[in-house]
Image (tube, helix red, strand yellow):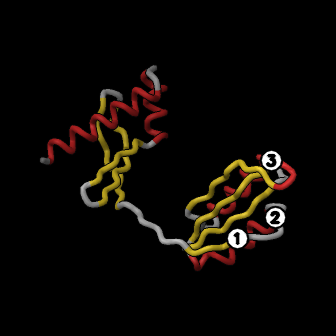
């Protein structure tokens, strides 16, 4: 796993968004932006890209092509990823897909945004309410397994 970083102080948000899309399409596992200040108190953005070593050249070239940076910091990293799967849960708002992540005894649930958004709009309830009901359904399903 490699992390590629660059500090960029002379570009627009639209250009950075486009760069993120291109990096993800090229195989980046994660792309993030952090607001920072550089020398002379210039506001800037720290671009951080995580990718597999075999994609290193392609990601590096994209960053150098699509941004104004003239250099990159590159470091190796290890990564722990919880085992994930998608599970359907039944709620009063219909079936919602939920990402279930497990590691040892730790279990986490993340309802899928698009399913929750659609259910909230169809039923005239808040997005937060749909998320809450989907998470409750996950916990009930988990309790039923015990």
| Residue that carries the numbered disc 2 in the rendered image | 69
Residue shown at 57% from the left, 75% from the top: 76
Label whose residue precedes the other's in the sequence (3 or 1): 3
Q: Which mark lies nearer to you, 3 or 2?
A: 3
| Residue that carries the numbered disc 3 in the rendered image | 43
State whether residue 32 is above or below residue 138.
below
Front one among 123 and 133: 133
Q: Position of residue 63 (x, y in %)?
A: 74, 66
Residue shown at 53% from the left, 72% from the top: 77
Bin the neighbour count of mark 3 within 10 Å (Cα to Cα): few under 14, some 14-19, many 20 and up: few
Which residue ends up furthest to the front in the rendered image?
A: 40
> Which quadrant of the view contains residue 93?
top left
> Which quadrant of the view contains residue 135?
top left
Q: CA distance from mark 3 to mark 2?
A: 14 Å
Q: Identify the element where label 1 is drawn.
A: strand
| Residue 21 shown left or right of residue 96 in the figure | right
| Residue that carries the numbered disc 1 in the rendered image | 73
Q: CA distance from mark 1 to mark 2?
A: 11 Å
Residue shown at 74% from the left, 52% from the top: 45
Q: Position of residue 49 (x, y in %)?
A: 63, 63
Q: CA distance from mark 3 to mark 1?
A: 19 Å
């Amino acid at each position: 796993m490699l992390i590629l970083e660059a500090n960029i102080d002379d570009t627009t948000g639209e250009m950075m968004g486009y760069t993120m899309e291109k990096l993800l399409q090229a195989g980046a596992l994660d792309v993030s932006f952090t607001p920072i200040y550089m020398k002379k108190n210039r506001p800037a953005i720290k671009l951080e890209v995580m990718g597999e070593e075999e994609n290193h050249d392609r990601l590096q070239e994209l960053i150098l092509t699509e941004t104004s940076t003239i250099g990159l910091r590159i470091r190796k990293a290890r990564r722990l990823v919880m085992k994930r799967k998608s599970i359907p849960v039944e709620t009063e708002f219909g079936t919602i897909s939920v990402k279930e992540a497990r590691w040892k005894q730790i279990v986490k649930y993340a309802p899928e945004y698009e399913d929750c958004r659609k259910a909230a709009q169809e039923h005239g309830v808040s997005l937060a309410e749909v998320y809450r009901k989907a998470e409750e359904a996950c916990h009930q399903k988990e309790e039923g397994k015990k």
